[in-house]
Amino acid sequence: MLSFIVLLASCKKENSAQTSSVTTASAAALKAIAVGVSVTSNDSIYVIGTCARDHHLDSASFTSLPSTVTDYLTANYAGYTFQKAFTDKDSSGNTSGYVVIIQFNGNPVGLKFDAAGTFIKVLEQREGHDLSGKGWHEGGCFDDRDGRHRDTIDLASLPPGIISYFTTNYDQDTLVKAYKGRDSSYIVYSINNGAFATVFDAAGSFIERVELKDHTGNFTAINQVDLPASIQSYFSSTYPNYVFKQAFSVSENGTLSGYVVCLDANGTRYAVQFDASGNLVKAITLR
């Protein structure tokens, strides 16, 4: 997947691999870094918004990153492979943050951190010919951003092996929604004195089961419009161009205690927990 990682002229570095002046201009405007190649079109994939207009990026080694950055990666992306890192410097040469590119479950992930190494956001990805405009096209690797949820699988249409797994191991689960990824793996969201995401491979064989919240409560599946405005604002800034998958409200003894929201950001799935006031508790990387 990751055949190359290069810093583009957008951050004051030269790149002779540009395929068109349109791509070059768009990359410069969006402060883009090429991180891989799309399997659907062989077009380059870029992370965008890596640095401010008057900033530049300098290459950085893994060992030069703050421990807060490496600790975050270990805690949130178990089994990741480091690809490349950059120091974000302002016009005076002062460090204002870091950009780190990793590979996680076969997908590139770009992350932005501040000068102290505190996580800021997951950088949006685009295919090269989508750098300008809305950021995706139908049939491209990010076409699920159109909101049509073509990856949704009817629960009755799940492979027999998946149905059998739940019947045998979690017969009290209430299945809520299921999706089929581009790698043909499945993820099934369910409720059973808690909320869970259960992942299966393309053959329907079990991979992992993740509890979406640390403790039990009364979980109710809700729609995106039912979430507080503060939560939706958080996603827009932290996971730009994310795709909503499923949300749950959580109550204890009849009182709202929080929310869990499942989303897809550039092919990586997350479950993000909030308290009753919409304040972030933590994010879990599902796959």
Image (cartoon, helix red, strand yellow):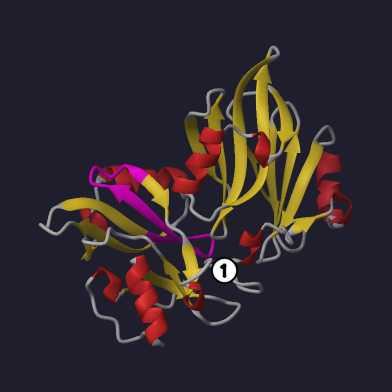
Tell me which corner region of the image, top left, top right, bottom left or bottom right, holds residue 228: top right
- Specify whether 138 is left or right of 178: left
Q: Any magenta on residue 261?
A: no
Q: Quick one: 107 or 162, which is closer to the camera?
A: 107
* Highlighted range, magenta: 101-119
- Specify whether 66 is left or right of 234: left
Q: What residue type is labelled 1?
A: Trp
Instruction: Identify the residue at image location x=73%, y=60%.
Output: 151
Q: Residue furthest front?
A: 133
| Chief secondary structure of the magenta portion | strand
Judging from the image, what secondary structure is the residue with disc 1 in?
A: loop
Instruction: Identify the residue at image location x=54%, y=75%.
Output: 38
Work out whether residue 105 can be spotted: yes
The percent coordinates of residue 217 (x first, y second) are 68, 21
Instruction: Identify the residue at image location x=34%, y=58%.
Output: 100
Q: Any magenta on residue 103?
A: yes
The percent coordinates of residue 233 (x first, y second) are 50, 41
Work out whether residue 287 can be spotted: no
- The residue pinned by badge 1 equals 136
The percent coordinates of residue 53 (x first, y second) are 26, 62
Instruction: Identify the residue at image location x=61%, y=39%.
Output: 261
The percent coordinates of residue 188 (x first, y second) are 73, 47
259 lies above or below 93 = above
Q: Residue furthest top?
A: 253
